[in-house]
Image (cartoon, grey):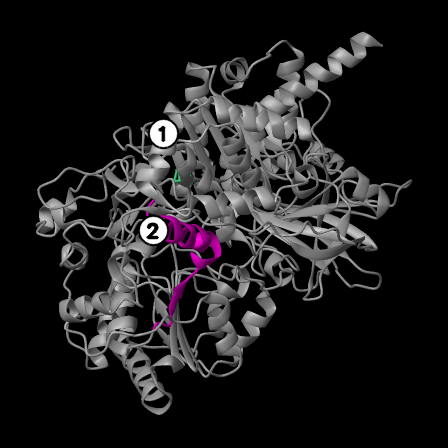
Amino acid sequence: MSASVKTTCPYCGVGCGIIATPKPDGFLAIEGDPDHPANFGRLCSKGSALGETVSLDGRLLQPHVHGKPATWDSALREVASRFAKTIEEHGPDSVAFYVSGQLLTEDYYVANKLMKGFIGSGNIDTNSRLCMASSVAGHKRAFGSDTVPGCYEDLEEADLVVLVGSNLAWCHPVIYQRLVAAKKARPQMRVVVVDPRETATCDIADLHLAVAPDGDTALFNGLLAHLVESGLINKDYIETHTNGFDEAVEQAIDSTHDLPEATGLPAQQLAQFYKLFSENERTVTVYSQGVNQSSGGTDKVNAIINCHLATGRIGKPGMGPFSITGQPNAMGGREVGGLANMLAAHMNIEDECHRELVRDFWKAPGVTTKQGLKAVDMFDAVADGRIKAIWIMATNPAVSMPNASHVEAAIAACPFVVVSDVVNETDTVRHAHVKLPSLAWGEKSGTVTNSERRISRQRKVLSAPGLAKADWWQLAQVAQRMGFEGFDYNNAAEIFREHAALSEFQNDGTRDFDIGGVKDISDSAYQSLSPFQWPLRFSEKSQVRMFANGGFFTPDHKARFIAVTVPARRHIEGLLLNTGRIRDHWHTMTRTGLSPRNSSHISEPFCELHPVEALKHGINEADLVRISSLRGSVVVRAHVSARHRAGSVFLPMHWNDQWASHARVDELVEAHCDPVSGQPSLKDGLVTVRQERFSAYGFMVSHERPLTHELDYWALAKCEGGWRLEFALREGSEWAFQRGADTTYQDASTGDLRSLWFQDRALQRMVFLSSSPVAASRSWAAEQLLISHNEPAKRFMLAAGRPPLDQPDKGAVVCSCFGVGANEISQLASNGCSSIAQIGKACGAGTNCGSCQSEISQIISGVIHEELVVAAE
Ligand code: SF4
């Protein structure tokens, strides 16, 4: 094996340290970095499976111009000349960059410098707009700066952790694991989960508040009113370090006359929560997309921050509001001004002094004087022709933007589209006039910032394949070809030094973001840079927490309470659409879709529907259902679950046209934005649901990637040894699936068909076809692709679709690290394993990354519950 490299996980905002070691087969061995302060060696199922995602399958390895392979020089000249011509003819606001929290800070820095400083437009926005713009806006309103005041340790040191709109167990699993360990060490710690769904995170909750959608503003306004009425506020902190308290309280009291109605929560639960908050000074409130992705997201953030300011619980160990970001480098993007409404280094576009400072530092011809278009407005401008040239980097807006079909149509009709990506075929790349091959994780070098303001190195482990190049290099080359000076960078370290120097330039403590302490870092010191938290001012230490003693970045250095209005509770006809992530997939699956392990947990798009809704609409478990809004529709598998609120339906956000026939969830979502942050609301669309009938339902495992174009419904996933495919056919559809089969078996009573193909002893393909959803054991069927089938006489037994009686059926995979299924865990629980630790000892499940522990716990509880019911009978 080659030398190991310390780097950072490219998925969520936890920002875990990883040790990656190249293997002789070209893949990577992955371990958690025991020295990294974000994870201390832990990894979740996504991070652990990273080594499986580095194959060159489907990679874009050469520039393409208008569909033809091209040299870098000709591609860059085409981009530079088309952008220059568009600007010359239509002005700087006729072009745009749409970038990504997947970019490294150095890439982001050059993109922002080129657009805001040299092209002279604010039209650079990022997919982070979809994930945390409301937190940024809330921070800036309250603190005068986009500052996360605390650190991860605060969650471990708190006596009360309130998780609002955050399925930490699945979306930020390592922080969840740290919380679980802390609660185990100090059982008196209390955890409250505020979420309309009973998610996996509720497994450690002492109290789950299944709040009505958007009822959280009322919940926290009510808490502020309660704190005041009970005399539990910190008068000293309020008087010395804040403004606007009286107005905020007046508004809170006014808006919370009927809290059970406004929140959808019983009075007794509200009282229980308010008592817990009142009694525990060491309280951290963690919030994520359930708060941010709302048309009132910024108000929700400020309603939470108000409660922390009122109690002075901020910036001290175990205390503070804590926004946790979705993306690996959302914070880095914020630091360099990757959002259309921010300048570089946390400076403000509207501030003339800031603009002058940046112009002088960059020696830029004309720094933009106004904010650019935020993501939703940007693609509207593409659609109506105001933007005529767009460069999209490291993101897939044709899937991930709300009203995705409208966005895809806008991109398709745009006169000039450049896409920098690692993947040759995505729903967005297919519309590019110029495709530029970028470096993937593992090949890139630079820095990222996690949710606790910690900057870490992402280091190159693998050599650049084909002609792929760093995004910063692509941008700098185009800038030079457009005739701009100040872009002659030789490496990422040079860009980092410039970024650090700008953060310190004329700062003197007036701005929160300052990493002047590393502005003179040498190339070799940059290479070995250890993770550190900002601010890191020259000749000072990193500041771990902020604002315990005030010192806010407002003109009077005081924080601002924000008077927050509670939106009227919506009582709707139909279903509310809630969207989110699943445990083992990430964004639009361009990376996790490559990993069999990541697909073994959930391999098909689904919806979660309450039993009451299922009954009302005549839907059974595993039916295919069509979910429609005014914008479009998807077809997914139904999962009936009482863990979801009646009156709403949950859909995961990941699937797209590369992996399923009709599952782009953001096609359903209207582009309603928070008026302050411009962040789209992705959790309150109105939809209908109905059963989607097909004449035949199928399941296939195949060594070769199956063709899907003749299928009316399909969902594809990778498995060890090949592919698995769910599909369905309509009446009259032609699909000659039996052609060339070695064995075909038809059940005389049901008409179900099973066909098998072999090459020598190896199973090549196995297809099940039925008039109702196929009941075969999926994980067992996939395993048959890996097994030698030596006895021809026994091969027909595979047609049963499940293991023989003397072999257990492990069921759906729960622990993807060890491939342990739900049936195996149930069996162990029935045999007396009554804790996660005992299950782990017996079969390994839950002992590696720990991401499946909450599901193991649910299975154990289910078995115990069943046994109690049987005993009572
Ligand atoms: Fe990666 Fe998981 Fe850590 Fe997030 S929690 S950074 S996905 S290993």
Outermost residue, right direction?
749
Which numbered disc flags the more N-terminal residue, 1 or 2? 2
**416 is higher (above) or lower (below) than 774:** below
Task: Look at the image and say whether residue 134 sits in the magenta stretch.
Answer: yes
Q: Is residue 242 left or right of residue 818?
A: left
Residue 443 in sight: yes
Foreground residue among 108 and 453: 453
**706 is higher (above) or lower (below) than 834:** below
Q: Give the secondary structure at mark 2.
A: loop
Q: Position of residue 274 (x, y in %)?
A: 55, 28
Which amino acid does the dot numbered 1 rest on? Asp
Foreground residue among 487 and 515: 515
Q: Position of residue 577 (x, y in %)?
A: 67, 52
Which residue corresponds to the image point at 81% horizontal and 8% vertical from the top-left?
A: 872
**348 is higher (above) or lower (below) than 24:** below
Q: Give the secondary structure at mark 1.
A: helix
**762 is higher (above) or lower (below) than 92:** above
Label 1, label 2: how far apart the Cα atoms are: 19 Å
Q: Indicate which disc residue 848 carries.
A: none
Name the residue tied to disc 2. 146
Name the residue tied to disc 1. 154
Name the quadrant containing residue 193: top right
Which residue corresponds to the image point at 42% horizontal and 21% vertical from the top-left?
A: 181
Which amino acid does the dot numbered 2 rest on? Asp
Q: Position of residue 754 (x, y in %)?
A: 76, 44
* The magenta segment: 122-148
Q: Is residue 537 left or right of residue 350?
A: left
Which quadrant: the C terminus? top right
Ligand 1 is found in which quarter of the picture? top left
